[in-house]
Image (cartoon, grey):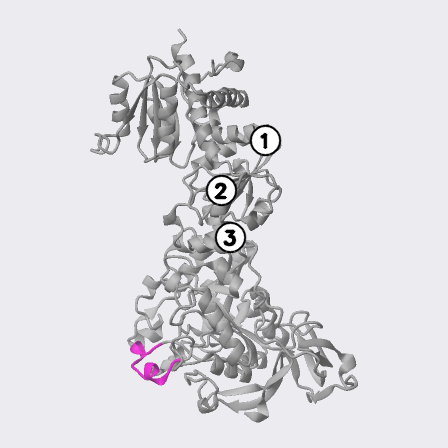
């Protein structure tokens, strides 16, 4: 399928002709190639001009030098599921505030989801987000457009024109498309354009007002539960539809072992299926809900510890492709309510990497592999040129201090909303510097 | 003047014309030759013949049609038949009579030729099994529309001098199109190279097994085509069910000057009608000199005369 050329895939275009910057004395990690070595990296005109062991101590003449003190220099993170508030929910988040939170969390590209008001289901809305991104954001921002008009699950959107305008993927946000015929046609139609369908998999009739994982904890708390089968059934249906249509499919967030098995089977069959997991489902479980703590109310709900372990196992095995923050800012008004009545969602842009480093510190997973799920893998799925520490790649970089411990103080977070499940948590490791298209957009000292 | 001077030895061996599927290439050629003469005959001043004199032709259209029905009516009248249009809308059929009962009722009136269009695939064949007369399929659901394929072939042959070896690209709602199915069969039988172009949602499953090369992009599908055949897309399929919108459909699949550049410079533009200008075809393109859309209508009458005559020869023969 030929798409109209708009030339708007990049939102941050660096000024050319600037002096080179050399990052020396760094621990280089390129998750794509598996490269991990002490060295340096040179940025010129917004791109990575050179890197390697030969630059560890020596910067090219005339270059501005940044000493990385042996810290990790890696590609900036790409976060596939971010609700950025605009248009319509500016009291919760704006593209500008989300981008500052992203920069502070080492996220250099955010993909914003379409459940805005109005919904991003029209070319004009895609243009609007791109304009906002260009004018107000400090990191790259790309919109995902809706699969169905108004997220109503009935009529597909102008997938071809939306992709041409710059939508990097298609999703109905936190809504599942219950009508299998609609999903079939959307997958089939999207295939002609090579468009990626990102689907939230929860059978709405099985969710049926459930507010947390269905299990012993929900029974004790007297809360209506969401069985993990609600997710797995929808996922299995989708896989059959992928088999039928051949459309590229990405399960936005899986949360339980049974879903992991479904993904494994689909991949073994050679289907164009990938999946993501939220940082919450990798590091938290249903017990964290404790005494009705609404900051732990998310969708899909936090599951049992054994499901969390399955998520980690799936990540290590490579069956889970992508880690997302599932950043979903909610103001206090909708969170400080009885659990069942509180809104779901958790912010996560700023804690994504430090929380993920828990898995590294636990020795569950190696650093390049962990970073791959937040850099080169989402980049490949979305067709972005970034996520690489390679010559010629965009200089979207982060400098990571792996070991400094810190306690999350919601008041110091950049997001407009403070609904973090890592509230007061001790985390280990933080982002020292974030570089987007060669420009430093965040340094820890400033924070 | 006889309209069948040259191919007088052509003998149509079937009682009905239910689909292209059941015809041999020789039979298709024979019908086209006969139709070609009829087309010349139709351009004369005196257009009345009597090969169907004494025969009764009933047009039974369960699905609304303007051009096909009037074309059959005109064809029958030019050949001297007694033509009756069965009014389906105000008849007992609307009152719940089954197809088979309708067939039996009509059969009792002893017609010679029934021309039938029905919205259900296979319905015309079912009816044909129950009557003693000849039946012509004027379109059954998404199955076949043999006279349309024949008139398309005649139009191509008269303009290009041949069918074998031509690249024919058919674009539009292939999934629901009986025109596409009949054309694919006929054009293959006569040695053309057939391509079909549509978004996946409008492409029948296993389309590649139908005898056509499958494309989802106009630029690729129209490349070097000799014939560009556009199909109509029903509006109710363009609001998000099969296709997101008219705007998007036209952008990617509507035939405009730009997309047409991929085809050969002398490529013919065809459309079975009725057209949605600005949806599947740009208005200016529909009116280009190499657009033969009106000629298709003209050939429609000729082809139907040829079919009627071929069937009549068999009826009249002792």
Closest to the camera, between mark 2 and mark 3, is: 2
Stretch of the chain drawn in magenta: A330-343
Report the residue at 51% width, 34% height from top.
B184
Bin the neighbour count of mark 2 within 10 Å (Cα to Cα): few under 14, some 14-19, many 20 and up.
Answer: few
The one of A334 and A20 positioned closer to us in this rendering: A20
Residue B42: image location, x then y, percent: 45, 22
- Asked if badge 2 and badge 3 are on a common chain, one would say yes
Name the element at disc 2.
Answer: loop
- Asked if badge 1 and badge 3 are on a common chain, one would say yes
Name the element at disc 1.
Answer: helix
Of the image marks 1 and 2, the number of the one nearer the N terminus: 1
Above or below, A65 relative to A112: below
Quarter of the view holding residue B85: top left
Q: Mark 1 — residue?
A: B160
Residue B272: image location, x then y, percent: 45, 37
Residue A434: image location, x then y, percent: 60, 83
Q: Say which chain tag 2 marks.
A: B
The reply to whether the magenta stretch includes residue A288 is: no
Report whether A207 appears left or right of B162. Answer: left
Q: Mark 2 — residue?
A: B287
The reply to whether the magenta stretch includes residue A335 is: yes
Of the image marks 2 and 3, the number of the one nearer the N terminus: 3
Bin the neighbour count of mark 3 within 10 Å (Cα to Cα): few under 14, some 14-19, many 20 and up.
Answer: many
Report the residue at 45% width, 24% height from top.
B302
Q: Are marks 2 and 3 in contact (CB under 8 Å)?
A: no
Closest to the camera, between mark 1 and mark 2, is: 2
Quarter of the view holding residue A209: bottom left
Q: Mark 3 — residue?
A: B252
Q: Say which chain tag 1 marks.
A: B
Q: Say which chain tag 3 marks.
A: B
């Amino acid at each position: 399928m030929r798409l109209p050329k708009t030339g708007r895939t990049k939102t941050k275009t660096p000024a050319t002709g600037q002096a080179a910057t050399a990052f020396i004395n760094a621990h280089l990690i390129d998750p794509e190639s598996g490269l991990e070595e002490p060295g340096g990296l040179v940025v010129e005109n917004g791109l990575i001009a050179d890197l390697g062991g030969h630059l560890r101590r020596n910067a090219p003449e005339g270059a501005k030098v940044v000493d990385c003190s042996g810290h990790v220099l890696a590609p900036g993170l790409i976060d596939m599921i971010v609700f950025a508030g605009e248009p319509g929910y500016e009291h919760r988040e704006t593209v500008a505030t989300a981008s500052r939170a992203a920069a502070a969390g080492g996220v250099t590209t955010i993909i914003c989801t379409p459940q805005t008001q109005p919904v991003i289901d029209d070319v004009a809305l895609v243009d609007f987000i791109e304009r906002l991104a260009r004018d107000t954001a400090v990191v790259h921002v790309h919109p995902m457009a809706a699969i169905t008009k108004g997220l109503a699950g009935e009529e597909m959107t102008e997938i071809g024109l939306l992709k041409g305008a710059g939508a990097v993927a298609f999703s109905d946000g936190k809504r599942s498309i219950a009508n299998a015929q609609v999903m079939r046609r959307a997958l089939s139609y999207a295939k002609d354009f090579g468009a990626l369908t990102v689907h939230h998999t929860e059978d709405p009739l099985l969710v049926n007002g459930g507010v947390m994982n269905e299990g012993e904890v929900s029974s004790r708390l007297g809360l209506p539960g969401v069985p993990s089968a609600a997710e797995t059934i929808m996922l299995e249906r989708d896989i059959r539809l992928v088999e039928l249509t051949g459309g590229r499919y990405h399960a936005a967030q899986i949360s339980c072992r049974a879903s992991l098995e479904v993904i494994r089977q689909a991949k073994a069959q050679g289907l164009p299926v990938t999946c993501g997991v939220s940082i919450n489902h990798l590091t938290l479980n249903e017990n964290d809900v404790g005494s009705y703590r609404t900051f732990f109310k998310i969708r899909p709900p936090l599951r049992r510890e054994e499901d969390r372990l399955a998520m980690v196992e799936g990540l290590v095995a490579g069956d889970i492709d992508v880690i997302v923050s599932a950043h979903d800012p909610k103001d206090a008004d909708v969170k400080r309510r009885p659990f069942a009545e509180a809104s779901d969602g958790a912010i996560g842009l700023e804690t994504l990497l430090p929380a993920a480093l828990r898995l590294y510190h636990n020795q569950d997973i190696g650093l390049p592999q962990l970073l791959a799920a937040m850099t080169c893998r989402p980049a490949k799925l979305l067709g972005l040129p970034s996520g690489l520490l390679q010559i010629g790649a965009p200089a979207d970089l982060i400098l990571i201090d792996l070991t400094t411990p810190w306690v999350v103080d919601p008041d110091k977070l950049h997001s407009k909303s403070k609904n973090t499940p890592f509230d007061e948590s001790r985390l280990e490791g933080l982002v020292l510097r974030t570089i987007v298209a060669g420009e430093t957009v965040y340094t820890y000292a400033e924070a | 003047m006889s309209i069948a001077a040259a191919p007088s030895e052509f003998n149509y061996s079937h009682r009905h014309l239910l689909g292209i599927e059941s015809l041999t290439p020789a039979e298709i050629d024979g019908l086209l030759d006969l139709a070609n003469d009829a087309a010349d005959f139709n351009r004369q001043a005196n257009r009345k013949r009597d090969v169907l004199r004494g025969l009764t032709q009933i047009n039974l259209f369960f699905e609304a049609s303007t051009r096909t029905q009037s074309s059959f009516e005109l064809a029958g009248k030019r050949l001297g038949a007694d033509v009756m249009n069965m009014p389906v809308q105000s008849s007992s059929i609307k009152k719940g009579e089954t197809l088979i009962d309708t067939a039996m009722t009509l059969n009792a009136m002893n017609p010679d030729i029934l021309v039938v269009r029905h919205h259900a695939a296979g319905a015309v064949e079912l009816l044909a099994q129950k009557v003693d007369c000849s039946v012509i399929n004027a379109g059954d659901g998404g199955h076949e529309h043999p006279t349309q394929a024949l008139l398309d072939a005649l139009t191509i042959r008269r303009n290009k001098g041949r069918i074998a070896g031509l690249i024919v690209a058919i674009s539009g709602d292939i999934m629901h199109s009986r025109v596409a199915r009949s054309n694919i069969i006929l054009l293959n039988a006569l040695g053309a190279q057939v391509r079909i172009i549509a978004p996946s949602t409008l492409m029948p499953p296993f389309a590649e097994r139908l005898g056509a090369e499958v494309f989802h992009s106009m630029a690729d599908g129209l490349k070097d085509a000799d014939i560009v055949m556009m199909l109509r897309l029903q509006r109710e399929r363009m609001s998000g069910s099969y296709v997101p919108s008219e705007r998007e459909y036209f952008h990617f699949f509507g035939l405009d000057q730009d997309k047409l550049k991929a085809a050969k410079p002398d490529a013919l533009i065809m459309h079975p009608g009725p057209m949605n200008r600005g949806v599947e075809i740009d208005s200016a393109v529909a009116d280009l000199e190499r657009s033969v859309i009106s000629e298709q209508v003209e050939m429609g009458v000729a082809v139907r005369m040829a079919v009627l005559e071929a069937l009549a020869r068999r009826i009249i023969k002792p």
